[in-house]
Amino acid sequence: MKKQSETRKKADRHCPMIILCIFSLVFSLAIAKIFVANRLSTAGIRIEGIEQKTAILNDENNRLRGEITRLSSLSYISSQATKIGFKNNGSVASLTFDIPIALR
């Protein structure tokens, strides 16, 4: 009976300490949960911004590909050449020699 009384007194002394530890643990975990949730929402906003920038850059790339295709087409090059004074020459002349030039 005496042992039970001593054990109960020890338990009664430790009970507030255990309750304080449990309360501290719960409070710490609640703070950690809030911190993690905040970080995740901030990361989500950043990811959304990056996705928007990616979409804008993809649109710009597609527009530039189209412009490159238009500017490199033969009809465009021909019209630009005509504008700056090049003429379409109908006859082509070539010079040929009977003996190769290297043997002269």
Image (spheres, rainbow, N blue to C red):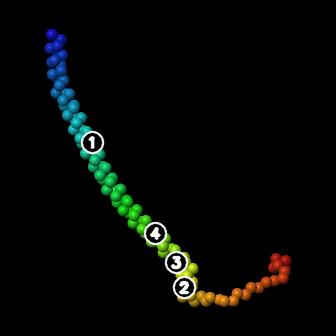
Question: Helix or strand or loop: what does disc 2 sit on?
Answer: helix
Q: CA distance from mark 4 to mark 1?
A: 45 Å
Q: Label 4 belongs to which residue?
A: 62
State the residue position of label 2: 79
Q: Looking at the picture, which amino acid does disc 3 mark?
A: Leu
First in sequence: mark 2 vs mark 3: 3
| Residue kind at label 1, given as amino acid type | Ala
Query: Can you tell which quarter of the image residue 77 is in?
Result: bottom right
Q: Residues within 10 Å of mark 2 (few under 14, many from 20)?
A: few
Looking at the image, tell me whether mark 4 or mark 2 is earlier in sequence order. 4
Q: How many marks?
A: 4
Label drawn at residue 71: 3
Task: Measure how far apart labels 4 and 3 are at the Cα level.
Answer: 14 Å
Question: Residue 81, position in %: x, y?
Answer: 57, 85
Closer to the eye: label 4 or 1: 4
Q: Earlier in the sequence, mark 4 or mark 3?
A: 4
Residue 32, numbered circle: 1
**Mark 1 or 3, closer to the camera:** 3
Residue 48: give its label. Answer: none
